[in-house]
Image (tube, rainbow, N blue to C red):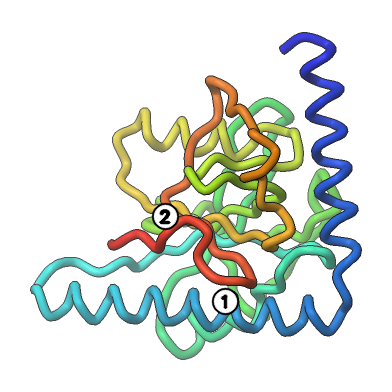
Amino acid sequence: MNENKENNAVQLRTRLKELRAAQSSSDSSRGALLIRGRLYTWLATNVTRLREEGRPTPKNIAAFWSMPEEPQLLPLLRQWVEEDGYQVSLPVVTAPDAPLEFHTWEPDGPMRKGAYGIQEPVSGPAPLPDIILVPTLGYTRAGDRVGYGGGYYDRTLAALKEAGHPFVTIGIAWATGDLSEIGHISQPHDVRLDGILTDKGWAVPAPAL
């Protein structure tokens, strides 16, 4: 990527952060509640169908620890573990240019501050995920994602695909991150997401499991 592209990417991320920061706290709280509700319904509906068809159901969900400005997922993660019996994992940064590792998360388990100040579980690696929730700063209606610039999720998703592991990706974003009118051009290393959920609904239709 040349210097001009790098500058454009930085400017884009700055603008997207400004747009989400302009949301009122009440809109953010309400939007996060709607995201959690839609996500819960999506998974429950798919699991019911799979059981009726006699097919395997997902067990392992890789989520993320929401930063204050991101949609808050913690109440849903707790419900999935304590009430529904799913195994939830969170990403752990092991090296600057390496894929993420997903470590098992328990609602009251020990946590520590990771490389970017984000909480990480103090536990061992979790089973490979069936579903991956991906923090998404910006997105297109085709499933292209703009993250925070570290490339961690692109490397992680690419490594899982190369290993032949099946999984479904759901981007979690604010509707302010919609890049439809900007004409965003994805990069060759970008990995498209299967679905993108925002506070205004599914920006990229919910995928079937």
126 above or below 188? Answer: below
Q: Position of residue 56 (x, y in %)?
A: 18, 66
The quadrant of the rendering that contains the C terminus is bottom left
Residue 121 appears in the figure: no
Horizontal arrangement in the rendering, residue 42 relative to residue 1 (left or right): left
Q: Nearer the viewer, residue 185 or 79?
A: 185
Determine the residue located farthest toward the front in the rendered image: 181
Total of numbered circles in the picture?
Answer: 2
Q: Position of residue 25 (x, y in %)?
A: 87, 79
Horizontal arrangement in the rendering, residue 195 relative to residue 51 (left or right): right
Residue 182 appears in the figure: yes
Q: Secondary structure at mark 1?
A: helix
Q: Nearer the viewer, residue 121 or 15?
A: 15
Residue 129, numbered circle: 2
24 above or below 169? Answer: below
Q: Report the residue at 49% width, 74% height from top.
A: 39
What kind of residue is marked 2?
Pro
Q: Which residue is mark 1?
A: 77
Residue 209, numbered circle: none
Q: Which quadrant of the figure has residue 46?
A: bottom left
- Callout 2–callout 1 Cβ contact below 8 Å: no
Q: Report the residue at 9% width, 74% height from top.
A: 53
The local crowd at label 2, few if under 14, some if 14 to 19, many if 20 or more residues have their Cα within 10 Å, is many
Q: Secondary structure at mark 2?
A: loop
What kind of residue is marked 1?
Leu
Q: Report the residue at 48% width, 80% height from top.
A: 80
Between the residue at mark 2 and the residue at mark 1, the CA separation in whole angstroms equals 14 Å
Determine the residue located farthest toward the top in the rendered image: 2
Q: Position of residue 55 (x, y in %)?
A: 13, 68
Q: Position of residue 68 (x, y in %)?
A: 84, 67
The quadrant of the rendering that contains the N terminus is top right
Q: Earlier in the sequence, mark 2 or mark 1?
A: 1
